[in-house]
Amino acid sequence: MFKATSVKAALGATESTDTILVNGWVRTRRDAKAFSFIEINDGSCLKNLQVIADAELPNYVDTVQQITTGAAVSVKGELVASKGGGQSWEVKATEVTLVGAADASYPLQKKGHSMEFLREIAHLRPRANLFGAVFRVRSRLSFAVHQFYQDRGFVHVHTPIVTASDCEGAGELFRVSTLDPANPPKTEDGAIDYGQDFFARPTYLTVSGQLEAEVFACALGNVYTFGPTFRAENSNTSRHASEFWMIEPEMAFTDLQGNMDLAEEFVKYLIADVLEHCADDLAIFGKFVDKGLLERLKFVLERPFQRVSYTEAMDIILASGREWETSVKWGENLQSEHERFLAEEHFKCPVTVYNYPKEIKPFYMRLNDDDKTVTAMDVLVPGIGEIVGGSQREERLDVLEANMDRHGLNKEEYKWYLDLRRYGSVPHSGFGLGFERMLMFVTGMANIRDVIPFARTPGNAEF
Ligand code: 4AD
Ligand code: MG
């Protein structure tokens, strides 16, 4: 069979070609006097390839003129320099085959659609220019993640998706169970007996691969995970998904400083990679989604991130004299409005906030000498707020055990985790970068639902 050429390759050709085969979906078709112009797109790039189908073609009236937006076609013809403006090459068709017709009910006709409407047709929206661009950038960004760590000698670890531990201790877990919900086995005191469940214990979808990544860092040195994570957190915001992907590096013999350095280098690397490799796709975001996008990305690349302690950040927030929707004081979590104020208005650049109060952070973070704060760090970026969350881990067995007691954790269940502190314990650090939040940052897309192929959010798991 004759091998098809992608639209991207055809448009990037250096010379004309006698015979070329191109497959794709019709974006538009319009008739001139003696021929028909068909714009086809195959998802390989943002641009369409223009096909000129001559009225002399044997199936011109029966087929070519019946082709409508959304139809799948196969075109054989000659790749020639385009006479019209706007494209370098076009195809002069010798054969047009209608592979799959689309009728007038095809929802993606040329007119613009709202993001909400496009979410309802998540099975068709990848064929819209904007979403083709989003998902090509997503693919490139994913590749760049691996390239960044592999180039630096980090080992990729596949941490489990089903787990028995709640890493973040927030209780936002999706239970994994094969018990009959209508008739679960009970213990003597009437509770559900998860001892009889599939894994003979309560299990959940993981909220983070960190604890398992720590195991591997304490053996292989520098490691990273990149996988789906799940949170049954009932927050319906533009930045929260119930299923999202996270990249979690973990480094042995590394303190908070080294951790903050890596986070900054990583975020900048991803921006630079996308600017270099996805220029066409980024241009559409700059045009239709966020006019200041390219300028902002370049600005972020060029400057060091600000670093402030939580205490300094709180002073700045309190001194701002603003009316907040949620007021805060030392010891409380920063809300998104405070995070965005720091990054967008006060510093006007990404900010790394470190040393948070121990009460508001998980059990595994290293206690500072002040006995009040832990070595947490969050990277906050304009437009989004928190994009990275991490810490140096508590490597001292006695302090970790005290932290676990304070958090009401059962030390028996974390025996394996405590063993890391029992045998050859080392200072180690890591963080999690929310992949979708990073994608929102580089594309300017305002809602996390629009950078995931099929978003899972409270009340929503269609497709
Ligand atoms: O700050 P988080 O909860 O940190 C952890 O899970 C650590 N165990 C990571 C580590 O140290 N290895 O989550 C990390 C990042 C956040 O900064 C945010 O970018 C993203 O994950 N994130 C979410 N993204 C989308 N939807 C949600 N519901 C998210 N929750 C966190
Ligand atoms: Mg966090």
Image (spheres, rainbow, N blue to C red):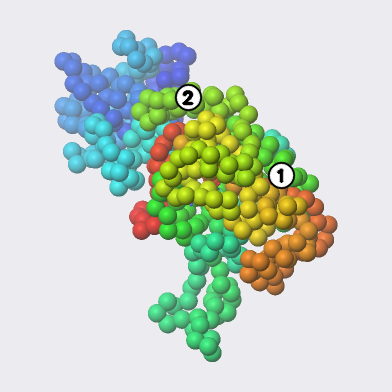
Q: Residue at x 74, y 49 (%)?
A: 428
* Up-down relation of residue 198 to residue 174 (above or below): below
* Up-down relation of residue 73 to residue 227 (above or below): above
Q: Secondary structure under badge 1?
A: helix
* Residue that mark 1 sits on: 256
**Of the numbered discs in the image, which one, if any, rests on residue 294?**
2
Amino acid on which disc 2 is placed? Leu
* Front position in the image: 172 or 150: 172
| Mark-to-mark CA distance, 2 and 1 | 31 Å
* Front position in the image: 126 or 186: 186
Amino acid on which disc 1 is placed? Leu
Q: Residue at x 61, y 58 (%)?
A: 359
Which quadrant would the N terminus be assigned to in this image?
top left
Q: Which residue is drawn at 72% across and 56% down?
A: 371
Q: Which residue is drawn at 30% across and 47% down?
A: 120
Specify the farthest residue to the right.
424
